[in-house]
Image (tube, helix red, strand yellow):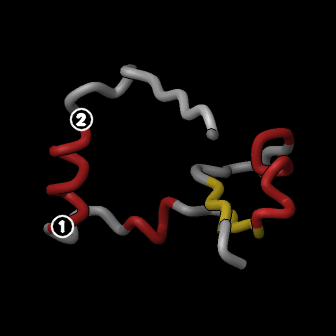
C-alpha cells in the first residue's frame, strides 16, 4: 500500500480550473517548466530552477 496525502488549501478551485482548461483559456503546457523521468523525481523536490512554475515527473518513462 502507498500512502497518499493531500491538502485542502485549494478547496473548491478544481471545477473552475478544469473549466478554464477545457475552454482553452489556460495553456497547461506553458505551466510546466521542467519535465523529469521518475528516476530523477527527487530533483524535482530538492532543486529549483529560476522562474520554475511546475515540474512534471513522468512515471512511465
Mark 1 neighbour density, 10 Å: few (under 14) some (14–19) many (20 or more): few
Q: What is the tally of numbered marks visible in this picture?
A: 2
State the SS at label 1. Answer: helix
Left or right: residue 25 versus residue 31 is left
Left or right: residue 1 versus residue 14 is right
At x 85%, y 50%, the residue is 43
Spot the residue most to the front. 1
Q: Nearer the viewer, residue 10 or 61?
A: 61
Mark 2 neighbour density, 10 Å: few (under 14) some (14–19) many (20 or more): few
Query: According to the image, label 2 marks what residue?
Result: 13
At x 48%, y 67%, the residue is 30
Q: Position of residue 40 (x, y in %)?
A: 85, 60
Q: Nearer the viewer, residue 39 or 3?
A: 3
Is residue 14 shown above or below 21?
above
Q: Nearer the viewer, residue 16 or 52?
A: 16
For marks 1 and 2, the one nearer the N-term is 2
Q: Quadrant of the C terminus?
A: bottom right
Amino acid at each position: 500500500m502507498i500512502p497518499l496525502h493531500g491538502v485542502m488549501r485549494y478547496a473548491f478551485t478544481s471545477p473552475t480550473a478544469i473549466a478554464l482548461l477545457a475552454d482553452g483559456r489556460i495553456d497547461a503546457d506553458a505551466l510546466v517548466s521542467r519535465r523529469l523521468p521518475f528516476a530523477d523525481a527527487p530533483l524535482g523536490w530538492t532543486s529549483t530552477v529560476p522562474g520554475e512554475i511546475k515540474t512534471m515527473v513522468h512515471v512511465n518513462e
